[in-house]
């Protein structure tokens, strides 16, 4: 129990005079400093309207000037850049929850400007109160605690008016200091609590940020598919060609030399595609150019490359494929490439059937291969079919994949609208 009480006491002391409280005091005093020009202008204007020199009227004038200066501050806070400046100060000094969400740029809408104006007024008002109490109350407390000059007379006056209380100068001084500390902690906590609501992003800004994040993620997924399909296909082909060359290196050196040449060509093409994708990653706005790559016009080269690995493809290609829209042609090529790569990975050098045809206003792709004995799975595999589905969905198409009813054939079917646009 004693330990718990000590912990609560330390927390209370930290909330009043700890590092966070000191930062908030600096933030509030900064608000008081920002209030001074508006306050002085109000004093001048109100003083010109009322030339009376009575001390009571002058004190009332200065008090009223505090409130007449706040509307002027609110008007200047409608300037868009104020939001970024106040947000930076609040993040550094206010110790607000979710401070990382506070504004970093100018207010671009009137709702954001009005919220900034309200925050600015609160910051200046609370800061003016705390700064005034600090500048006047702290020296007064020191005078009381040290019993300088009239401090003794003040203590005697208090004792005469309230006999028996024995309020001495030091106690009064401590009470004034405690009042300043409590005001700083209270106003600082209020500003910290209201900062996310007044300086945080508006619903429109949150939506725009979410859209930008979704665009970046979609582009990253798109580039990841490009790397997976192009480089993954090349590595699978190189692996099978290297294995075949190693088996016949002594018995059939001509075939081994041809396989090594095919490996060189495949690696060169893969490096070229890798440079293209990495170049897109370096672009500030990758979406502006989109990933370039091979199209259906390059299917013949792809099929010849696969023939060198031992995969025989019975291809049925419709005429007019090179003239298809570029986005559809590129995605269709990658889909065929990934489908044939899956044949290499999972069925080995087995015969495959490929049909790419046009049916009305859509492109149809069908790839079949016999199901052989199960092959060892690759670590990290299983992304190919998902990537094919994502490519088809991006063009408002669809795909299906799975074994036939008798379990002897694997079939991949994809359809893409010819007028499909990426989404």
Image (spheres, helix red, strand yellow):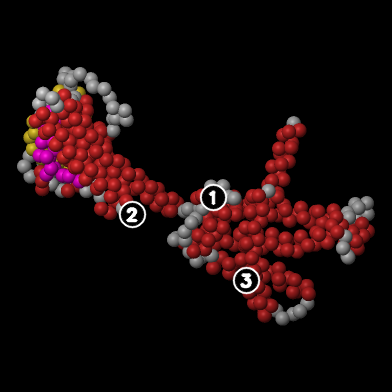
Residue at left offset 69%, top offset 59%: 130
Q: Which residue is mark 1?
A: 99
- Label 1: which secondary element: helix
Give me the C-alpha separation between circle 2 and circle 3.
44 Å
- Label 2: which secondary element: loop
Relative height, residue 136 to residue 201 (above, below): below
Q: Which residue is mark 2?
A: 284
Whether residues under marks 1 and 3 lie with C-beta atoms below 8 angstroms apart, the answer is: no
Q: Which residue is mark 3?
A: 37
Whether residues under marks 1 and 2 lie with C-beta atoms below 8 angstroms apart, the answer is: no
Across and down, in percent, residue 78 comes to: 51, 65
Range shown magenta: 293-311
Residue at left offset 14%, top offset 36%: 261
Across and down, in percent, residue 417 comes to: 17, 43
Across and down, in percent, residue 143 comes to: 83, 61
Determine whether, in the image, residue 146 is placed left or right of residue 115: right
Q: Is residue 144 visible?
A: yes
């Amino acid at each position: 129990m004693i330990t718990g009480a000590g912990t609560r006491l330390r927390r209370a002391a930290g909330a009043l005079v700890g590092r966070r409280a000191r930062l908030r005091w600096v933030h509030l005093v900064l608000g008081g400093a920002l209030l001074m020009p508006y306050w002085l202008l109000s004093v001048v204007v109100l003083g010109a309207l009322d030339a009376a020199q009575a001390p009571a009227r002058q004190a009332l004038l200065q008090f009223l000037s505090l409130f007449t200066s706040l509307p002027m501050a609110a008007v200047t806070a409608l300037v868009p850049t104020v939001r970024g400046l106040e947000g930076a100060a609040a993040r550094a000094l206010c110790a607000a929850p979710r401070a990382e969400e506070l504004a970093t740029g100018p207010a671009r809408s009137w709702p954001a400007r009005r919220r900034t104006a309200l925050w600015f007024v609160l910051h200046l008002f609370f800061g003016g109160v705390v700064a005034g109490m600090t500048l006047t109350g702290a020296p007064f407390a020191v005078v009381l605690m040290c019993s300088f000059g009239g401090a003794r007379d003040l203590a005697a006056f208090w004792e005469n008016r309230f006999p028996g209380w024995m309020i001495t100068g030091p106690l009064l001084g401590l009470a004034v200091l405690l009042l300043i500390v409590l005001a700083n902690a209270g106003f600082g906590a209020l500003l910290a609590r209201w900062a996310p609501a007044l300086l945080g992003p508006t619903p429109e800004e949150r939506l725009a940020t979410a859209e930008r994040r979704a665009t970046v993620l979609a582009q990253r997924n798109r580039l990841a598919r490009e790397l997976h399909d192009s480089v993954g296909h090349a590595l699978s082909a190189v692996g099978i060609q290297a294995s075949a060359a190693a088996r016949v290196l002594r018995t059939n050196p001509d075939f081994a030399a041809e396989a090594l040449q095919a490996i060189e060509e495949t690696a060169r093409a893969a490096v070229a595609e890798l440079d293209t994708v990495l170049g897109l990653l370096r672009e500030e706005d990758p979406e502006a150019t989109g990933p370039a790559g091979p199209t259906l016009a390059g299917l013949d080269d792809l099929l010849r490359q696969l023939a060198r690995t031992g995969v025989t493809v019975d291809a049925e290609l419709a005429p007019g494929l090179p003239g298809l829209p570029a986005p559809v042609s590129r995605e269709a090529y990658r889909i065929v490439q990934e489908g044939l790569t899956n044949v290499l990975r999972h069925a080995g050098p087995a015969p495959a059937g490929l049909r790419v045809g046009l049916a009305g206003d859509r492109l149809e792709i069908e790839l079949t291969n016999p199901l052989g004995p199960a092959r060892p799975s690759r670590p990290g595999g299983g992304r190919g079919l998902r990537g094919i589905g994502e490519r088809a969905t991006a063009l408002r198409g669809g795909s299906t994949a799975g074994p036939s009813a008798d379990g002897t054939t694997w079939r991949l079917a994809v359809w893409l609208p010819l007028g499909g646009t990426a989404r």
